[in-house]
Image (spheres, rainbow, N blue to C red):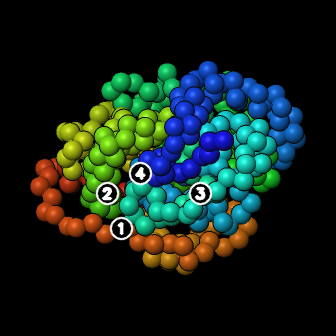
Amino acid sequence: MPSSAPASAALAYGTLDRLLHRIALGSDAVLEMSFDLERARHGKAAAARELGPPVFVTGLARAGTTILMRLIHAADDFAALRYRDLPFPLAPNSWSRISDRLKRHVETRERGHGDGLEHDLDSPEAIEEVFWKLHDGKHYCRTDGLVPYQPDAETLTAFADYRRLVCLRYGARRYLSKNNANVLRVGGLARNVPGARIVHPFRDPLAQARSLHRQHRQACMLAADDPFRGAFMRWLGHHEFGAHQRPFLLPAGSAPQGDPDTLAYWVSTWIGVHTHLLGQPEDVRETQIFVDYDVLASGDPELLNRLGRRLDLARPLSPATLRPPTALPHREAKLPADLLDEANRVHAALRKRAAAL
């Protein structure tokens, strides 16, 4: 019986593994059917659960989102999708009935980003976007990039059911996700998910842009060696970088300047995403929590305490798992002065918002 494994293990998938993932994740018809069956079989039990306020970690990739998610996950009774829920993430309870009998196991290993972070089947991860891609992909996935939009009432009702199903699967009272693409629907989450806390980690613009540039090149090379890997990330809705990269057209449908193989492109991306997040209306701002990861990674106790209080966490946030971002070789950045000035201006605004946490 095929098994699921982290994306970094995709190169080791056998023929049956790849076929199952292609069928389960690559077909909208199969995804829709799996979700319909899950709601029919487990919807009543899920609806009876009383849930606490959910937390959504979302921002631009390479900002410490994975570490932050794991930090939050350990501090309360959270349910988050895991690689164990693949390849049927829209049917977590139904699939667990089958997969638990298989006693699947994957050795803990470093993830494919090359940043020293390890994961296995039980690591909470960024899988939620499969839901949004199925229900709303036509509204925000364009050939030239990803645009912000407002989910409709039917999709939001389905998403409420989905959160409850995930919580039922893990016997938890609070839903937690890490999904960078939620920057496209931050207003919809803020206004329509009761009690939502939306956490936006960020880093120094040049450091984060360098990391994005490096990851894009690495992901493209890996996908060229094995196209299945690129397809796997596309099925999960990960378009941040790599062979199937699609830019966030932010703010207001604006595309990043330049080419993805240049640092300027990623600095422009950094500016666009964070300008969009900073520019939300007041009712959305009330749910947003900006976190300076460069400060958080130092284990600053005051910041950890303030963040824990803002998220209403049951237990203190532990600095034990925090780590500074991977240091990359410094190269002189030959970037337009106006681009750097704008990045520094936005960074100052982000730090000001983060200081008000």
Q: Is residue 117 left or right of residue 308?
A: left
Q: Quadrant of residue 43?
A: top right
Q: CA distance from mark 2 to mark 4?
A: 9 Å
Q: CA distance from mark 1 to mark 3?
A: 25 Å
User: Residue 19's x, y, as percent?
Assistant: 54, 33
Q: Are marks 2 and 1 in contact (CB under 8 Å)?
A: yes
Residue wearing tag 2: 211
User: Which quadrant: the N terminus?
Assistant: top right
Compare marks 2 and 3 and give the one earlier in the sequence: 3
Residue wearing tag 4: 61
- Disc 4 marks a residue whose amino acid type is Ala
- Comparing 58 with 90, the one in front is 90
At a point 28% along the width and 54% down the height, the residue shown is 214
Q: Is residue 232 above or below residue 108?
A: above
Query: What kind of element bears circle 4?
Result: loop
Q: CA distance from mark 2 to mark 3?
A: 27 Å
- Comparing 67 with 279, the one in front is 67
Disc 2 versus disc 3: nearer the observer: 3
